[in-house]
């Protein structure tokens, strides 16, 4: 949890100092994200190809919406 003392200090900084702090924090976050993906390792990626159950569900929803829209007209 962030202390109220730290928040007070940050609020008292100049605009340039605040931007610098944001830049440092974002750089740290970007580095942490880069560390999540390991080189020479494969990761599963979902693809819509051959997802027949999902396609059928979408078709049912579209048909139900179309039926509902026709009933309202």
Image: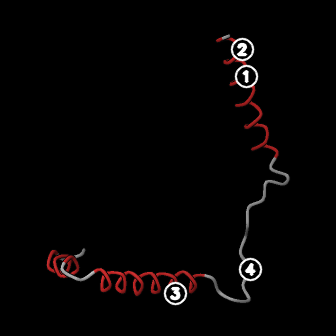
Q: Give the percent coordinates (x, y) of residue 3.
A: 18, 77
Q: Residues within 10 Å of mark 2 (few under 14, many from 20)?
A: few
Between disc 3 and disc 4, the foreground one is: 3
Asked whether, in this view, residue 33 is left or right of residue 18, the answer is right
Real-space Cα separation, disc 2 to disc 4, in angstroms: 48 Å
Residue furthest right in the image: 50
- Say which of 44 and 72 sits in front: 72
Q: Earlier in the sequence, mark 1 or mark 4?
A: 4
Give the residue at x 23% y 75%.
2
Q: Is residue 21 above or below residue 3?
A: below
Query: Closer to the camera, 6 or 63?
Result: 6
Label 2: which residue?
70
Precedes in sequence: disc 3 or disc 2: 3
Count neighbours of disc 3 (C-alpha within 10 A) and say few if under 14, some if 14 to 19, many if 20 or more.
Answer: few
**Residue under label 3:** 31
In percent of width and height, residue 11 lies at 21, 76
The quadrant the N terminus occupies is: bottom left
N-term mark: 3 or 1: 3
State the mark number for residue 42: 4
Residue beneath disc 1: 66
Q: Work out how far the residue at label 2 is from the one at label 1, CA to CA, in angstroms.
A: 6 Å
Q: CA distance from mark 3 to mark 2?
A: 53 Å
Mark 2 or 4, nearer chain start? 4
> Which image quarter holds the C terminus?
top right
The residue that appears at 70% across and 31% down in the rendered structure is 61
Q: Circles 1 and 4: CB distance less than 8 Å? A: no
What coloring was used for the rendering? secondary structure
- For the residues labelled 3 and 4, the Cα–Cα distance comes to 20 Å
| Secondary-structure class at tag 1 | helix
């Amino acid at each position: 949890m962030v202390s109220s003392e730290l928040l007070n200090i940050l609020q008292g900084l100049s605009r340039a100092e605040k931007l610098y702090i944001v830049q440092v924090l974002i750089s740290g976050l970007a580095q942490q994200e880069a560390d999540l993906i390991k080189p020479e390792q494969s990761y599963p990626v979902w693809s819509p190809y051959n997802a027949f159950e999902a396609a059928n569900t979408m078709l049912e929803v579209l048909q139900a919406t179309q039926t509902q829209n026709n009933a309202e007209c």
